[in-house]
Image: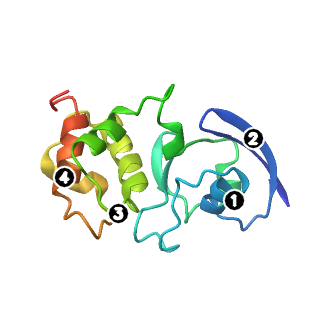
């Protein structure tokens, strides 16, 4: 076992973990952060995307021990005082989901994208969410949601 100290959604944790435990399993099984979806376990789908120290990572490719000393934000950690994060709100209003399986990862990738580029072009949006797969929507409404959440959006 290896001791890690990590902050997840603003709460500090001090835990013993198996060195081979994936971050996605630590978040879901130990901390109950089930909004972080286990998709493919191969980093192909992006459903497990979280923010680690402000950058999007696929938590199925990060070991829990690699998060030691870091700050993790999950989809559950985006809302504040019961209010959706602007990206979550934009996805809701633009109907940027169908089954919802990819939505947490898409939203987390979008938060990272908009933190680096507050007003991305359509091509930059496509690049920013690349690696996050959606099998239902055809991406049009996802792109509209990202545009709405951007500084150039209608908000």
Tell me the element at label 3. Answer: loop
Q: Residue 121 in the image: state x and y as whole percent.
A: 14, 44
**What numbered label is drawn on residue 29?**
1
Provide the residue designation for mark 4.
141
Pick the quarter of the image with the N terminus. bottom right
Foreground mark, 2 or 4, reads 4
Q: Report, in whole angstroms, how far the alpha carbon at label 1 lies from the one at label 3.
A: 23 Å
Tell me the element at label 4. Answer: helix
Q: Say which quarter of the image contains residue 73.
A: top right
Q: Report, in whole angstroms, how far the alpha carbon at label 3 lies from the one at label 4.
A: 13 Å
Foreground mark, 1 or 3, reads 3
Disc 3 + disc 4, Cβ < 8 Å: no
Tell me the element at label 1. Answer: helix
Query: Residue drawn at (24%, 55%), measured in percent from left and top?
Result: 127
Provide the residue designation for mark 3.
99
Label 1 vs 3, first from the N-terminus: 1
Label 2 vs 4, first from the N-terminus: 2
Query: Residue drawn at (23%, 44%), measured in percent from left and top?
Result: 145
Badge 1: residue crowd in 10 Å (few <14, some 14–19, many ≥20) = few
Query: Residue drawn at (42%, 52%), measured in percent from left and top?
Result: 104
Foreground mark, 3 or 4, reads 3
Q: Residue 19 in the image: state x and y as whole percent.
A: 76, 64
Label 3 vs 4, first from the N-terminus: 3
Label 1 vs 2, first from the N-terminus: 2
Provide the residue designation for mark 2.
13
Foreground mark, 3 or 2, reads 3
Tell me the element at label 2. Answer: strand
């Amino acid at each position: 076992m290896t001791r890690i100290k990590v902050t997840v959604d603003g709460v500090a944790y001090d835990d013993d973990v198996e060195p081979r435990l994936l971050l996605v399993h630590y978040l879901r099984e130990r901390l109950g952060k089930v909004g972080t979806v286990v998709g493919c376990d191969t980093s192909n789908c992006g459903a497990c995307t979280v923010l680690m120290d402000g950058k999007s990572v696929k938590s199925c490719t990060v070991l829990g021990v690699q998060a030691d000393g870091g700050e993790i934000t999950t989809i559950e950690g985006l809302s504040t005082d019961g209010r959706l994060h602007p990206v979550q709100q934009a996805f809701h209003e633009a109907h940027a989901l169908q089954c919802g399986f990819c939505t947490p990862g898409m939203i987390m990738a979008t938060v990272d994208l908009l933190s680096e580029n507050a007003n991305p072009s359509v091509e930059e949006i496509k690049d920013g969410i690349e690696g996050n797969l959606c099998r239902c929507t055809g991406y049009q409404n996802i792109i509209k949601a990202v545009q709405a959440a951007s500084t150039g959006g209608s908000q």
